[in-house]
Amino acid sequence: RFVSFFSVEGYADHYLRRDCITGSSGEVKMTWGLLHPVAMVAACLCFFPLSRILRRPLDVDRVINTLGLIFRNLFISISATTLQLFITEEMPNGRRMVRELPDIEFGEDRWLRI
């Protein structure tokens, strides 16, 4: 829990209370999950003007390495977010619900919209 505070999602949960603003539906949770990689790219782009202001040039090799790590994390984040829709639990009434989004039934219209 302490480490998640230093992530984008943890920061947003603690300071912005995004559930109060956007709601807590499955669609909103999936959208926030897909925005994680975008936040990483935006953070990286902030370093370019900052390096100009501080007059410290960026090392090209490190920039390329960082971009590679961002794209690797982008792939992992998007894959994990989309695959979580297929991890289900069977309920006592026989319905299969998505584990991460328990208000969505597997194969239902709402599941197909996501």
Image: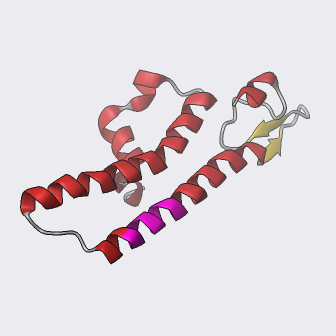
What secondary structure predominates along the stretch shown in magenta?
A: helix
Query: Would you identify the image quadrant in which residue 15 lies?
Result: top left
Q: Residue at x 41, y 55 (%)?
A: 4
Most extreme residue toward the left, as rendered?
A: 54
**How many numbered circles are shown?**
0
Q: In terms of image quadrants, where is residue 44?
A: bottom left
Instruction: Name the outermost residue toward the right.
Output: 94
- Report the front residue among 64 and 92: 64
From the top left corner, tell me how far across and down residue 9 is, in percent: 42, 45
Q: Residue at x 26, y 74 (%)?
A: 59
Q: Is residue 105 above or below residue 98?
A: above
Image quadrant in which you'd find residue 30: top right
Residue 110 coordinates in the image, percent (x, y): 74, 24
Tell me how the rendering is colored.
secondary structure
- Position of 34 relative to 45 (above/below): above
Residue at 45% in and 61% down: 70
**Residue 55 on image: x %, y %:** 8, 64
Is residue 68 rendered to the left or right of residue 46? right
Q: Is residue 105 above or below residue 82?
A: above
- Residue at 42% over, 55% down: 1
Q: Is residue 39 above or below residue 30?
A: below
Quarter of the picture holding the C terminus:
top right
Q: Nearer the viewer, residue 4 or 29?
A: 29
Within the magenta stretch, is there residue 70?
yes
Residue range in magenta is 64-72
Q: Is residue 65 magenta?
A: yes
Q: Is residue 16 left or right of residue 23?
A: left
| Residue toward you, 99 or 80 | 80
